[in-house]
Structures are given as C-alpha cells and as structure tokens.
Image: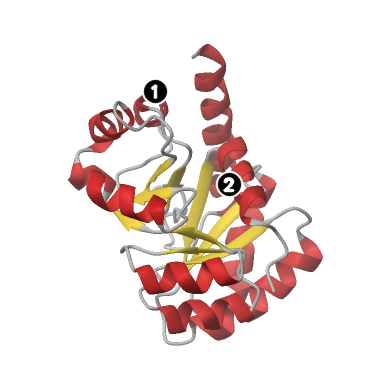
Amino acid sequence: MAKYTRIEVTHIMQQTGIVPLFYHHDPEIAKKVIKACYDGGARVFEFTNRGDNAQEVFSKIIEWSTNELPGMILGIGSIVDPGTASIYIQKGANFIVSPILNADIAKVCNRRKISWLPGCATLTEINYAEELGAEIIKIFPAAQVGGPDFVKSILAPCPWSSIMPSGGVSPEKENLTRWFKAGVHCVGMGSKLIIKNSDNDFDYEKIEKLTRRSIQIVHKIRKES
C-alpha cells in the first residue's frame, strides 16, 4: 500500500524539482544509487521496470527505503499495462509512471488513489490524460517532441497543466534553466545524473553532488523568476 497520497507526491515533486530515474538488477547497487540521490536532497525516486527481476528488486528496495530513508517517495516507471501497475501498487509503489497514455492504467491507479504520470506527446493526449485524473503529465521523449519550446506552447493555452519532461534533461545549469523557465513542474533525469566513473562503476559521490547542485539550480531559477 502506498505510504504517500497523490497530492503529497505532486507537491514533493514540485518542491524538489528533480526526479531521478534508474534501474539495476542488483538491489544493493540500486540502494547505493538511491541513497546517493537522497543524500543530495532528492525526495522522489523513480525505479524503472526494465528488467526480468524488476519486481523482486523493487520489493527489496522499497522496504529498505521506507526503513532507512525517511521522507523518500519511491515509485515505479516504464509501466505499459494495468496488470503490471497493479502488481507494483501491491508492492507499495507511491506513484506509477508510464511512457504511454493508457486509460486502463489510469483506472487501476484511480481506484487506489495512486499518483499516475502518463507519457504524452501532443496537447490532445495531455488533455485526455487530465480528464482521466493525471495531476502531472510526463512529456516523453521530451527532447524529440520539441523540448522547452514545446512546453511553452502547451502551457500558453493550458496554464493549469503540470508537466514533467523526461528525455533530454541534464544537470547543467543552461539545460535546467531552459526547462524551468518554460514552466515545467519538475524534470525526470536518468543517465545524465546517474553517472559512472572511469572504472565503469557508479560514481556515488558524484551522483550525490550532481543531485544537490541540480536542486540548488532549480531553487535559484524559481527564486529569480
């Protein structure tokens, strides 16, 4: 059962501005990455459903995060069907992220009052997702559908929409400035944030620093705006 309401998830995503996303088949490595992001100030984390054992790994890391990382909101991404969404909701996922718009996933999440972030690429899809109850819309693939200019164009006629771009977001100040000045609610960030060192191992210290710096940049942009 989810520990956080969809309103709480929406609020914390906006407050921190950064949603790290990541998958690894080894739960111990996943824990270290999540801990590095947490120590850097992230309070929302999207574990992606991309491996054969993703459900088992998620079960282990959500139990661990609940006990060891107070305030960390852990959800699941890359969900494309309602059955899989139901499984992760039973395992305690606090939110469901999808690369597609699927009304049946919306129904599953709404029945349990779980935050649902569908992937959309047109204003028609965004409008339909909001009709289905989505508080935050994932723009995916964000860079390919038009980047920050696309977000500006969407928010001009629909300023009530809350947008989270995923794909094409990086921790550089210039990149984050363009997205947040365009009006995004928050951003999803994967490989540009969860980086490796020269030995091809995850650089946990660097991940922590990049997370902290990214959040600081977001807060500064918002303050100046």
73 relative to 155, above or below? below
Label 2 CA crowd tier, 10 Å (few <14, some 14–19, many 20+): many
Residue lying at 44% horizontally and 74% vertically, measured from the top left: 49
SS at badge 1: helix
Rendering coords of residue 135 (x, y %): 49, 49
Label 1 CA crowd tier, 10 Å (few <14, some 14–19, many 20+): some
23 relative to 163, above or below? below
SS at badge 2: helix
Q: Is residue 82 left or right of residue 60?
A: left
The amino acid marked with disc number 2 is Thr
Residue lying at 39% horizontally and 64% vertically, measured from the top left: 98
Query: Closer to the observer: label 1 or label 2?
Result: 2
Q: Between 199 and 139, which is closer to the camera in this rendering?
A: 139
Camera sees residue 94? yes
Q: Between 96 and 50, which is closer to the camera in this rendering?
A: 96
Q: Are marks 1 and 2 in contact (CB under 8 Å)?
A: no
Q: Between 102 and 32, which is closer to the camera in this rendering?
A: 102
Q: Which residue is mark 2?
A: 10
Which residue, as the protein is rendered here, is positioned at the far top?
224
Tell me the distance, in whole angstroms, between the alpha carbons under discs 1 and 2: 19 Å
Rendering coords of residue 201 (x, y %): 48, 63
Which numbered disc, 1 or 2, marks the residue that appears first in the sequence? 2
Rendering coords of residue 28 (x, y %): 62, 74
Camera sees residue 23? no
Q: Between 81 and 204, which is closer to the camera in this rendering?
A: 81
Q: Which residue is mark 1?
A: 181
The amino acid marked with disc number 1 is Lys
Q: Is residue 7 left or right of residue 182?
A: right
